[in-house]
Image (spheres, coloured by chain):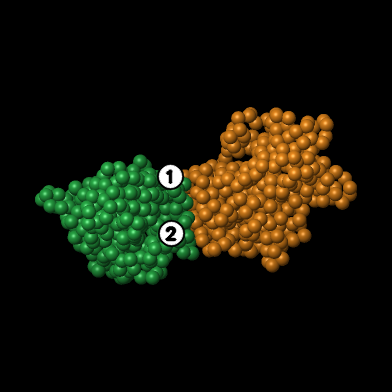
Chain colours: A green, B orange
Amino acid sequence: MREITPLDLPDMARGAAVLGTGGGGDPYVGRLLAQQALLRHGPVQLVDPMEIDDDAVVIPTAFMGAPTVMLEKLPSGAELTAALQALEQLIGKKAAYTVSIEAGGLNSLIPFVAAAELGLPLIDADGMGRAFPELQMLLPTLGGVSATPMAIADERGNAVSLETVSNGWAERFARGVTIEMGCSAAVSLYVLTGRQVKDMMVHGTMTLCQRLGAAIREAGEAHRDPVAAATEVMGGRVVFRGKIVDVQRGTQGGFARGEAVLDGLADDLGSRMEVAFQNENLVASRDGEVVVSVPDLICLLDTDTGEPVTTETLRYGLRVSVVAAPCDPRWRSTEGLALAGPAYFGYDHEYVPV
Amino acid sequence: MREITPLDLPDMARGAAVLGTGGGGDPYVGRLLAQQALLRHGPVQLVDPMEIDDDAVVIPTAFMGAPTVMLEKLPSGAELTAALQALEQLIGKKAAYTVSIEAGGLNSLIPFVAAAELGLPLIDADGMGRAFPELQMLLPTLGGVSATPMAIADERGNAVSLETVSNGWAERFARGVTIEMGCSAAVSLYVLTGRQVKDMMVHGTMTLCQRLGAAIREAGEAHRDPVAAATEVMGGRVVFRGKIVDVQRGTQGGFARGEAVLDGLADDLGSRMEVAFQNENLVASRDGEVVVSVPDLICLLDTDTGEPVTTETLRYGLRVSVVAAPCDPRWRSTEGLALAGPAYFGYDHEYVPV
């Protein structure tokens, strides 16, 4: 167990943005909210998953919606605690811990807000090891854990709860409700036991975010290559270096969808790359050939500073390096690929692991 | 108190279709479901609202969605009882009675299904005295009763519950969820006390439906004018007689919207009428001038048989009489008109009572 103070958050947010693979919401928003909550309520205890009781009640918290909207409609901690408490009431039990369902982007820092507001310790783990656009794309889904009962709350005081026959239906209803709530809402779902956290979540990802963010910052301070530093922490490799020459983007069905086109600046890494995204980067093709795809991580980093580039901040002329990193091995199982592999997103190429 | 058997249902369904003012869903579907439930479980007790205890727990049941879809995707009693029981669980109380929120169309007969399945008596009353397209358009809304907690259930076993800050928000979320459920869902909402039923509901409307349906049938059997018979029971008047020459129709945002154009066949009643609808008939204009509008009732009856014509069964060549009938007087208050008057539906004319 260790204490997380507001000083830990900037590195953690930077690392979370890298694992967000372009999406997962702007971690700057998450950082601001977490910072405010930690300043008001004091530090949050970050707990190793192996330290918790097998029968502990663990209730995750998150924001759901279109990241582009969250930049304009800043969420508050009130709806987060409302969602968590509504779920406590539904199950008739109190949470002993909260945890992140998604280590990438906004949702890696959001549970710190709930933890600080409610005085709960936070578990150093998450349910994806990255960010994914849909709520059923969680390793516990593979383990048979139900996303429901699930609670959804907005900033007006509205609350919706779901009890569905599958996690896919939970995604469908929750997406519809989130859209009615103005494309962003606080959610609490996937009630887990301590044992399930140990068996099904990705361990240590909050600490990984912090290490990754620190590596980029320290490389910059020491005038070393920050992209190389990040790549090393993630165990990945640089698959392209180039300049953004085109971005197409739209909000569709509550998602930010689009594509970025890059012109090559490193002769040995090809001349053109296309990166398709749905909130997160999904597929990177180099000179017409797929080189990385979901569930592996496709991270765009500013070539000079190593700062992660989200799909909202893609813009013409930006020089970026594209880093491919391996996903949690459980995503590479047949069931994992069915849930979050290229075919699910409508691509017909085979998945080739990084 | 009296017993309702399957033999009472055909007249009741016919009358309900008249009060449905073109919408409210096909009462034939409601009649089939109610008939089946009464044959299986025996008669249902119909109770006068003045007979019930002031503190009795009353839980209404209904179907929500696009009537055009319900014709193709026949709802079952299972999701109705699921919705009512989900709401019982939310409030931690058992229903002593169920009641209709809407006397017009499908939803006048639907509560008989829940009553028969669960062995509950049904109150002879409803919340509108007619049919309206949106769930906040209920007299209890005017009395400050919350539509939530509300439960929504589908035929797959999914359940959604709502707790909203206003009945307008309940409509918005419930509509979105209903659309995701395939444009039709069972709902249970507006938990009422016996006192609230007495004070805020329209009394005797189940019996009115039956009387109205019987009057049309008996007039036909006796070779009297069935339209005149219906008009008399409703205390209304015939405002047009003509032939349908055009129908425009579409499904939009979960509603059936459109307009019918009629050519006159009775010289003293004008030469042309336009009837605009959103599930229900909203505004009837005669030779360019509004003659009836919501919240008053606009009922299209087959001129020969007196059978009610719903917006789904409007077709070229049909000879219809347009009957205008007064709404419950509480709809004519400033608050009532704000909730369900012409301005709410986007019309800029003043409301002129029938």
> Cα distance, mark 1 to mark 2?
27 Å
Which label number is shown at residue A182? 1
Q: Nearer the viewer, residue B103 or B20?
A: B20
| Earlier-in-chain disc, 1 versus 2 | 1
Using the image, name the chain to which the residue with label 2 belongs.
A
Residue A114 locus on image (x, y percent): 31, 53
Task: Mark 1 vs mark 2: give the one in front.
Answer: 2
Residue at 64% across / 42% down in the picture? B258
Q: Secondary structure at mark 2?
A: loop
From this view, report whether residue A70 is shown above or below residue A280.
above
Residue at 77% across / 53% down in the picture? B11
* Outermost residue, left side: A222
Residue at 41% across / 60% down in the picture? A347
Q: Secondary structure at mark 1?
A: loop
Residue B256 locus on image (x, y percent): 62, 46
Name the quadrant of the C terminus of chain A. bottom left
